[in-house]
Image (cartoon, helix red, strand yellow):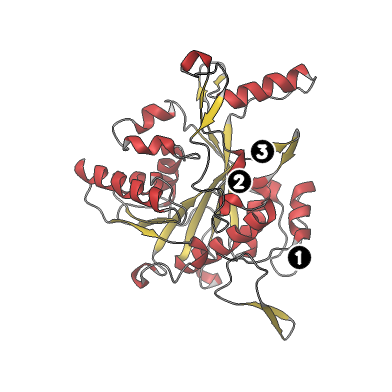
């Protein structure tokens, strides 16, 4: 897929984007404002302060990720470089949907969102760019059906930046909840082999830490940071079109560090959502650590622990990441007089 700058025209001072363009530009000023502090009020969206969003903590890692997937996902699922924790998807589904409602993941990966949806008695549809992972997602749906869950579940192969035309018309305006996560590209850790776990040369090696071919520039995981944000904005714009009025979007996302500098991707994703016409309603904490009596028991990867150790040796008091942010947005209701309180529409 080409990544040339999208063609735009102006009509009456309003910028118009070609519907076939793969990206939607977002204001660098908006990103910078969220990087450095609360978003400033503006006439287009009204006053907004990211620090005023309601917050809740989801205890989603009381069992290890492998235990959450055991017997419920095919073995090929473990090779995905950035799997969503099943309990995170399950919690969002319970909180924002009712049985029989439709859940959608525009970047379905190995199908975690879809499996958790139909296990909870919801219908599910997903889009996946890479053919291999689309096949794994279908296998996971088949496995869920073997457990007796016969709710509708479908995976569509394609580029989510081309929503909503990519999905069958029957889904348009019917989605109660979108659950997804942006691809992290080269920042994913994958799995590791060391001298103690079979490394033939005694060195540490990563594996299962890449999305498909790194030469595929049509894959959002292989593009730069700001192209990722622009592409993700395009995806959220498509999600807004298939959501029902008042439907929610839950995005799991975490910051990362480049040369010890924190990149606040969660706040940038809020900017993407606002640009797509969605309203931020919550910024939650989904724990990746187990809650013990007096502490959190972290489940950091080998590379996370190694990075923290080296940074502490250099005098930087960093800690293991123990949670993911969950950004919750909502499609506005059609009329103001029927608008529900933020964060309540669609909950069970």
Mark closest to the chain's N terminus, 3 or 2: 2
Count of marks overlaid on the render: 3
Q: Of the residues tagged 1 and 3, which is closer to the observer?
A: 3
Instruction: Residue 327: give x, y in percent of width and height.
Output: 57, 48
Residue at horizontal 51 percent and vertical 16 percent from the top: 293
* Residue 125 visible in the picture: yes
Instruction: Residue 52: give x, y in percent of width and height.
Output: 68, 48
Q: Give the quarter of the figure containing the N terminus.
A: bottom right
Residue at mark 3: 256
Q: Which mark is residue 54?
A: 2
Q: Of the residues tagged 1 and 2, which is closer to the observer?
A: 1
Q: Quadrant of residue 301?
A: top right
Residue at horizontal 49 percent and vertical 61 percent from the top: 160
Mark closest to the chain's N terminus, 1 or 3: 1
Q: Which mark is residue 42?
A: 1
Mark closest to the chain's N terminus, 1 or 2: 1
Observer-nearest residue: 238 or 297?
238
- Cα separation between marks 3 and 2: 23 Å
């Amino acid at each position: 897929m080409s990544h040339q700058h999208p063609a735009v025209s102006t009509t009456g001072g309003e910028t118009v984007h070609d519907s076939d363009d793969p990206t939607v530009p977002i204001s660098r000023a908006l990103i910078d404002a969220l990087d450095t502090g609360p978003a400033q009020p503006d006439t287009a969206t009204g006053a907004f302060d990211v620090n005023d969003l309601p917050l809740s903590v989801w205890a989603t890692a009381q069992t290890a990720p492998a235990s959450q997937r055991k017997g419920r996902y095919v073995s090929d699922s473990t090779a995905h470089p950035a799997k969503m924790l099943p309990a995170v998807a399950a919690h969002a589904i319970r909180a924002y949907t009712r049985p029989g409602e439709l859940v959608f993941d525009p970047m379905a990966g190995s199908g975690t969102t879809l499996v958790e949806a139909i296990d909870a008695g919801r219908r599910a549809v997903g889009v996946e760019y890479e053919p291999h992972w689309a096949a794994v997602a279908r296998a996971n749906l088949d496995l869920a059906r073997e457990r007796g869950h016969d709710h509708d579940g479908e995976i569509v192969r394609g580029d989510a930046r081309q929503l909503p035309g990519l999905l069958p018309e029957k889904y348009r305006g019917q989605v109660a909840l979108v659950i997804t996560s942006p691809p992290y590209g080269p920042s994913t850790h994958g799995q590791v082999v060391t001298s103690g776990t079979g490394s033939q040369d005694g060195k540490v090696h990563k594996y299962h830490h890449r999305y498909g071919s790194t030469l595929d520039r049509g894959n959002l995981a292989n593009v730069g940071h700001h192209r990722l944000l622009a592409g993700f904005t395009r995806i959220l714009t498509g999600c807004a079109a298939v959501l029902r009025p008042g439907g929610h979007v839950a995005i799991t996302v975490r910051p990362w560090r480049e040369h010890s500098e924190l990149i606040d991707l969660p706040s940038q994703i809020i900017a993407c959502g606002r640009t797509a016409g969605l309203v931020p309603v919550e910024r939650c904490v989904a724990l990746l650590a187990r809650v013990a009596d007096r502490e959190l028991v972290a489940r950091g990867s080998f590379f996370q622990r190694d990075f923290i150790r080296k940074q502490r040796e250099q005098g930087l008091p960093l800690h293991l990441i123990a949670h993911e942010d969950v950004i919750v947005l909502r499609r506005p209701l059609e009329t103001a007089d029927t608008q529900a309180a933020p964060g309540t529409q669609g909950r069970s």
